[in-house]
Image (cartoon, rainbow, N blue to C red):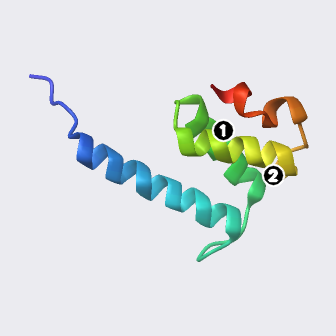
């Protein structure tokens, strides 16, 4: 029998993952690695995570962990 995922546990896991990404980006509790943070946020954004989409757009806008890309920093680019 196939086990179904508990939506509350999935959301809690996703929240922990995003907190880890924030720590990677800011260097809170771990070594700061903006390029790694960008790559991980990008993967999450490609999986339709809205918070990650916003962060990827910001990081493209600010050139944080990646080159500045005005086209990809647009909110429309990730909808």
Q: Secondary structure at mark 1?
A: helix
Q: Nearer the viewer, residue 23 or 71?
A: 71
Tell me: 64 left or right of 8.
right
Tell me: 31 left or right of 3.
right
Q: Residue 11: where, in percent of width, then height?
A: 34, 47
Disc 1: which residue:
42
Q: Quadrant of the C terminus?
A: top right
**3D distance between C-alphas at marks 1 and 2:** 11 Å
Tell me what residue is drawn at x 42 percent, y 48 percent: 14
Tags 1 and 2 in contact by the CB under 8 Å rule?
A: no
The residue carrying pointer 2 sits among few (fewer than 14), some (14 to 19) or many (20 or more) residues within 10 Å by Cα, namely some
Q: Nearer the viewer, residue 74 or 53?
A: 74
Q: Secondary structure at mark 2?
A: loop
Vertical side of 24 occupied by 27: above or below: below
The residue carrying pointer 1 sits among few (fewer than 14), some (14 to 19) or many (20 or more) residues within 10 Å by Cα, namely some
Tell me: 18 left or right of 4.
right
Q: Residue 56: where, in percent of width, then height?
A: 70, 42
Q: Quadrant of the N terminus?
A: top left
Farthest residue to the top: give it: 1
Farthest residue to the left: give it: 1
Tell me: 57 left or right of 6.
right
Tell me what residue is drawn at x 76 percent, y 57 percent: 34
Disc 2: which residue:
65
- Count of marks placed on residues: 2
Disc marking residue 32? none
């Amino acid at each position: 029998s196939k086990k179904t995922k508990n939506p509350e546990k999935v959301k809690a896991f996703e929240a922990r993952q995003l907190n880890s990404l924030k720590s990677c980006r800011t260097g809170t509790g771990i070594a700061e690695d903006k390029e790694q943070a960008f790559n991980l946020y990008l993967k999450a954004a490609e999986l339709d995570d809205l918070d990650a989409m916003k962060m990827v757009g910001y990081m493209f806008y600010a050139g944080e962990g990646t080159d500045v890309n005005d086209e990809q920093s647009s909110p429309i680019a990730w909808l």
